[in-house]
Amino acid sequence: MLGQQKLLHLADTAFSHTKADQAEVSLRVLESSLSRFANNAIHQNVFESNATLRVRVIFGKRTGVAESNDITPEGVKRTMDTARAIAQSQPESPNPSPIPQSAAAQRMDAFVPGTAECTPALRARVIGDVCGLAGAQKLIAAGAFRTDAYEIVIANSHGVSQYHRGTIADLHTVVMNDAGTASGYAVATSPDVRVLDGDAVARTAIDKALRSQNPIALAPGEYTVILEPAAVANLMQYLAWHTFNALAVQEERSFVRGKRDQILFSPNVTLYDDGLAADGIPSPFDDEGVPRQRVQLIENGAVRDVVYDTFTARRDNVSSTGHAVPVPNVQGPLARNLFFAPGDKSRDELVASVQRGILITRFWYTRLVAPLHVMMTGLTRDGTFLIENGQVSLPVKNLRFTTSFIDALRNTRAVARDTQLFHDERSGMTFRAPAIVVDNFNFTGVTQ
Amino acid sequence: MKDLAARILNMAQMRGATYADVRVTTRTLQTITVKNGRVQELSQNESQGFGVRVIADGAWGFAASSRDDYADVDAAVNRALEIARAGALSKTRDVRLGAPEANKGSYRSEFKLDPFMISMSDKINLLLKADDSMRRVKKNGAHLVTTSELVFVREDKLFASTEGAAIQQESIESGCEIQALATNEAGDVQTRTYPWGRHQQTRGFEFILAQQLVENAPRIAQEAIMLLGADPCPPSDNATVILSGNQVALQVHESCGHPIELDRVLKQEASFAGTSFLTLDKLNNLQYGSEIVNITADATIPGGLGTFGYDDEGVPAQRAEIIKDGRFVGYMTNRELAAELNLGRSNGSMRAENWNRIPLIRMTNVNLLPGAWKLDDLIADTDDGIYFDTNRSWSIDDKRLNFQFGTELAWEIKGGKKTRLLKNPIYTGVTPNFWRSCDAVCDESHWVVWGTPRCGKGQPPQTVRTGHGASPARFRNVKVFSRS
């Protein structure tokens, strides 16, 4: 890690090389370690150290962006020169996305030294325990144990100067039988590696794998389902991308366009984004350096707000909510610290409330079929069970669903009180989700 | 680069590595995006660094760094060895790589016009013209969002190993896409893209010019608007379908390319990407498709996104037979797994996204070889069918057996002619059943090496560019329906 002082000095160096009317500098440092295992042994084991400089310069109505991981003095100058050359090579834009004015972000302590300093030996020990527990049941475990430490600086010529550092630890496993016909999944995520309970992760996955043997086939159709937290997190991700995004609203492809304060979802559903929540992965400012605001997306079933970046906020004559991804872009702002508010039911009470339905551990390969209603297709995976008379009974073969995630939130009839934290490494999004009960969830196929 | 590589290998050996290799890579990515008539994004990303992979105490370790001063190199080598030795604590066997690969050589991808030498204004003007051409079409009350994109990649890579390999490779990629998204007051949203999402090859700017983006732009926008008023694809449990060449490419990618990755077969990707229905007992024993289905993994064909001189273990590019006369005959392999299973020499399928990732078994160019039909003749030969064109959504299970794919549009075929435009078409099937129902493949005049630039796999995640030679093909008894 390079530290706040050095990163801010690098930002100053970058600014000294530009005469742009407006300039923005982003510096990101990542030290990422990951031990991956399969067949009850570690087979991939990696470490990466990277530091990236991204600059956005605006000359009049021309914008240029350049990025490089050469942060030597020469490299910084070259990146600034590249950004200038790019800006000057293009026609004037009638409406360039402005660089935001200064506002101080709340300082958040999201850095846990124990996570940053986690050794490969410690990861190997935890993985050894997971594999040992699986092997004792004649099962095989696969998975990954990741520990990341990161720093971010966003500074701009209007006086924005934000620094944040944090850590993420994530352990997940899929435990399966040798034939690969029965499997179970479990995951634990936290900024603090010390709170990850490897044994609990292993035992949950093992239990699901053992109970998944000899699944029955259910006919496609509509079922009441209990979506466990991992599946709910997946649902939240697609709603963030396609629905609660100001650009999607402005481009007339969001379901909530023009429906503020209308009750369109179940009263059991409250969804919000909060980068400052201590029980998430704190992220106090966005990729423009704008402090993140808590944004209520759905409140007791009523549509509330969507998230904004500076560009989309200006179009609607409002303020950015601090949800920019690197600007400029074509996808618009993103709610990336999502929370599904907990309900008041225990997991057992959720199960007891279902006469006949399906318990789903997680989704796999979910893809957008139609954006407006967030019509999705995908499959169940790693723990799918029939519920009969309020009890989890037989394992079932994985099913393909083709259903609207908007409708799923309309049909949410109960929400669990316990929630779980997830971090999607690909998108950088975090989710805190409970299990939920959804009626009329549509399955269109059963797997062989 | 060579000095740095030699220093890293020396350090690794001196400190106890029984094998080490290093990749020193510099990669430049240029992206130009125009949206609704204005330049939305114009950026250049340069990434450089090295990744050192070692075997110590019989286990793998890998460390990568963007900085190459002595302290960083020293730390990275130590880290790779520390990781390997920690991993050895839970190993079940020692890593063995088979016969040494001490290849020396160089490779440069074929291109005529270096895209980085084309003026930025020429590139921007091309997209602005294409965008303008899309926006000029009659909208009939529809709301239209237009996007167009050019992407160029230059990669310089040095590979060296303690076995004596020393390989320098340079490649250029060019990619493009135009997209029209049409919506109406009823809330329908329809998208058309051309050539198919982002099409990309290891070619120069001549590839972009050959796509004729401006010439195709009005048709794409018109089709997006026409789809708003089109009939939905009628359901059937036993339809005859013809897939466009680009949809065949997607079908090959998902239902053949991924399940032949040997690491998936051996459950090494079980926790993320999944496993494979093509288990070891199926090799040479499974009729995967009909007898006209022939599929290769070929890293040697010109222009493919999976074309290179040597893979990221220093193994020369090869052409491997995967499906021969419908029978499943080969996997994509690496050195370690080929040696473990006595499959002979690796067929050179190890690829890493960049310097900071380990190589994994990845698709090169996985191709359905051309058949004998002209597309017009194939349509004329189809009395009642549906022509599916250009992928829109794709989903397949973790064994790559049960799939459901949707395309942007379809055409009803009646009496050997394309008749009605159909919207929201979806087809679904089970991989070997589907390929066994293939009764016609179009000839090489229709054959295009489609680029799929965003193939994800691995943890940490890696996005690798793969290629798929394909031409339109016909399938019988397919379940089809509409999404709404």
Image (spheres, rainbow, N blue to C red):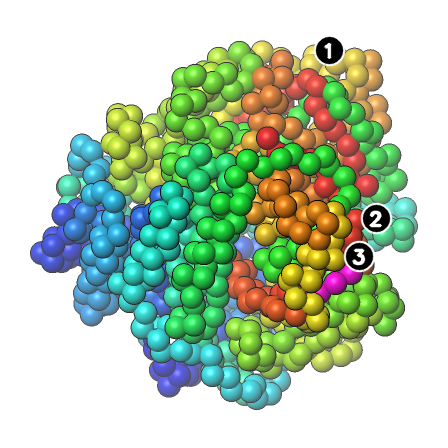
Which residue is the site of mark 3?
A411
What element does badge 1 sit on?
A: loop
- Picture quadrant where residue A104 is located: bottom right
Pointer 2 or 1: first along the chain: 2
- Give the mark count: 3
Q: Residue B346 appears at what percent x and percent y?
A: 29, 31
Tell me the amino acid under the disc marked 3: Asn
Marks 3 and 1 in Cβ contact (< 8 Å): no
Which residue is the site of mark 2?
B188
- Same chain letter for marks 3 and 1: no
Residue A381's tag is: none
Image quarter of the C terminus of chain B: top right
Residue at horizontal 28%, vertical 41%? B313
Residue B188 or residue A394, whichever sits in front? A394
The segment highlighted magenta reads A412-416
Can residue B210 be seen here? The reply is no
Using a 10 Å C-alpha cutoff, classify the residue at mark 1 as few (fewer than 14 neighbours), some (14 to 19) or many (20 or more): few
For residue B217, side relative to residue B20 (left or right)? right
Q: Main secondary structure of the magenta part?
A: strand
Residue A341 or residue A251, whichever sits in front? A341
Tell me the amino acid under the disc marked 2: Asp
Circle 2 chain: B
The residue mark sitting in front, 3 or 1, is: 3
Which residue is the site of mark 1?
B381
